[in-house]
Amino acid sequence: MPAVTLTEVARRAGVSPATASRVLNGSERKPAAEIAERVRAAAESLGYIPNAQAQALARSSSGLVGLVVNDIADPYFSSIARGVQAAAREHLRTVLLIGTAGGPAEERRAVEAFAARRTDAIVIAGSRSDRPQDAADNEALSRETARYLANGGHMALIGHPFPGDQDPAVRVISVPNRDLARELGRRLGGEPFDDYVVVAGRGGLVTSDLRTEGFQQGLADAGRSPAGVVRTDFDRDGGFAAAPGIAAAVRTAHDAGRRTCVFAVNDRMAIGLVAGLREEGLRVPRDLGVAGFDDIETLRDFRPALTTVRLPLEEMGRLAVETALGDASPAEVTGSVVLRRSTQGPAHT
Amino acid sequence: MPAVTLTEVARRAGVSPATASRVLNGSERKPAAEIAERVRAAAESLGYIPNAQAQALARSSSGLVGLVVNDIADPYFSSIARGVQAAAREHLRTVLLIGTAGGPAEERRAVEAFAARRTDAIVIAGSRSDRPQDAADNEALSRETARYLANGGHMALIGHPFPGDQDPAVRVISVPNRDLARELGRRLGGEPFDDYVVVAGRGGLVTSDLRTEGFQQGLADAGRSPAGVVRTDFDRDGGFAAAPGIAAAVRTAHDAGRRTCVFAVNDRMAIGLVAGLREEGLRVPRDLGVAGFDDIETLRDFRPALTTVRLPLEEMGRLAVETALGDASPAEVTGSVVLRRSTQGPAHT
DNA sequence: CTGTTAGCGCATTCAC
DNA sequence: GTGAATGCGCTAACAG
């Protein structure tokens, strides 16, 4: 049972397909009011729905915006997705979603899939990786991107440019991860802690590396010596897994009369860490301070309230599509350090 | 700068477009191995990417799966979305995402948009509303759905069927909200509480109503008298807003030597409620018990650990696309009551 | 202002 | 096994 076509509507209204097309869609040519009404009535009575594929083919613009995320169930990405979805709707576009497990190889495939659909714009929210073993895939991703752009596509990256060469046509919604982490380091460096530790993701994860680096700079600004760095998975379980090691270090430090503050490079890791520490018999902030990054909405009611860095996630998503579509220029978003109870020692309580 | 077309590849390889099509896509006809290689080489060197729009038009199958959710940033929906995305990928489909603010009117528009794109299947994860004022929109949604189905589309609903008539062609991934809530009521009814309260969403929200209803049945099963019902928004802020009223009731009950247990019909409301109660100076579970529903992953580390009902969210998403695509038959998912610390009184501690 | 004619890029009958 | 022809549904020049 095939769908109703424009031709059928036209015949039913006693006009040509061209005329029907003109009235049913916003064209320059304005058909006579009387004839227009007849067409609209025919379309209505037949239950006509335009075939978006055919429209896209004919006018070579798909009305689609592609979004690639690592994991849509991760609140960081789902918040961005909300912004993308909202902006897309306002621009009369529909969102195509692809979740990769992370990594440039899969991202390249996503870009290819979006290119095949002739998406008007692509937003990549996944994190960049500059590990040597990803170099080839990054290169391939860049090539795929270049091809997409050459064919008239638009692209915006959330966070940071691609490692290596960056096609200037690719817009970037910059997230000042380093600067914000630095500010966080400075602030926490001013608190009454003695030792600092960073629980980071694996090396080569740009976001993780920049946050780590910035935090160290901030500590230095505050006249502190560098934090030790522990590497683990960039998610909740990674934080949880790091707990035993951190606990041991904290206890040792404690015995020496020193207080420890841990910076987990994202909120989910921080939450996992706190959970793991709880199992180790340590409590935050009584036994140590813990800070995160992102200010995930779902975790706002978490106790102890988590010191973190707020990022305008939804806004970042909006900006990305508007920038990609040419309705806004590439910008750097602003975030802010939010000190909460998780880094307040007993003295503050 | 137009994209490379199949025709160009064919010419480059010195074959006809038909042959090129046959080798570049899985066709019945198997071109000669030698000629096939030539075509593949040409495609590769030209950077050919098939135009999915054109393919869709020609073979009238889009390779698209539409997903409609209320709010992609809500962890309930984003978990489902992960399942949908994963299953879609396995079935070589791409996900089209539309977020509605909830309500059948917007859902109808979403279905129309998906129908226009000729999606192979549509998954609706948003919650049903059977308020009288939504009756007309529900009717329109049903009609839109019928039209989509008549045109060869497939649809799966997560949760419950549409209010009113339900086209049998619409598959439903049933979520036993009532039964699970009943089980929860039964279990909590067996705990040492005296009064029960349900913090529900507005009336007419099917999910909320069924959970409320089931919980009441469970209490009755346990020989308890019905819980009072408070209506508020179906989200975190709704739970938060309900806190003052609940706090007052709890205090009154407490003065009479009675212990209260509150069932918030979803986890986010429960978390908001707990946060609000904290501001009121009440602590859980010391001063009252609180339970939720859904077992949102991001909230697993929340303290006090929340008594809730676990739902296989990701699995529900997977099942929905597989069922819609015809690779699985409509089924009822299974959940389970998870008693945690938030409903354990001091006696248990 | 309306109707006619061509494609958009591809898959798929048919002939060969 | 391969190529030529046709049509998917629609829009955009063209004429009229």
Image (cartoon, coloured by chain):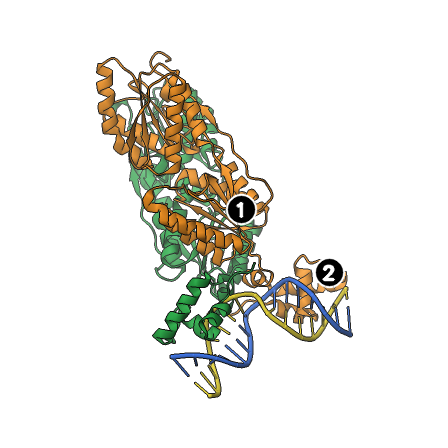
Chain colours: A orange, B green, C yellow, D blue
Percent coordinates x, y for residue B35 in the rendering: 38, 74
Q: Position of residue A152 (x, y in %)?
A: 55, 54
Q: Residues within 10 Å of mark 1 (few under 14, many from 20)?
A: some
Are tags 1 and 2 found on a single chain?
yes
The quarter of the image holding the C terminus of chain B is top left
The local secondary structure at tag 1 comes to: loop
What amino acid is found at the position of numbered circle 1 in the picture? Ala
In the image, what residue type sits under mark 2?
Answer: Arg
Chain letter of disc 2?
A
Q: Quadrant of the N terminus of chain B?
A: bottom right
Disc 1 to disc 2, C-alpha distance: 34 Å
Q: Which residue is mark 2?
A: A29
Q: Going by the image, does A282 lie left or right of A3?
A: left
Q: Residues within 10 Å of mark 2 (few under 14, many from 20)?
A: few
Vertical side of C9 occupied by B262: above or below: above
- In the figure, residue B36 lies in which quadrant? bottom left
Work out whether residue A197 can be spotted: yes
Q: Which residue is mark 1?
A: A169
Position above or below: A7 against B126? below
Give whichever of B31, A242 is nearer the camera.
B31
Q: Count all numbered tags in the image, as a single digit.
A: 2
Residue A320, x across and y down, in percent: 52, 42
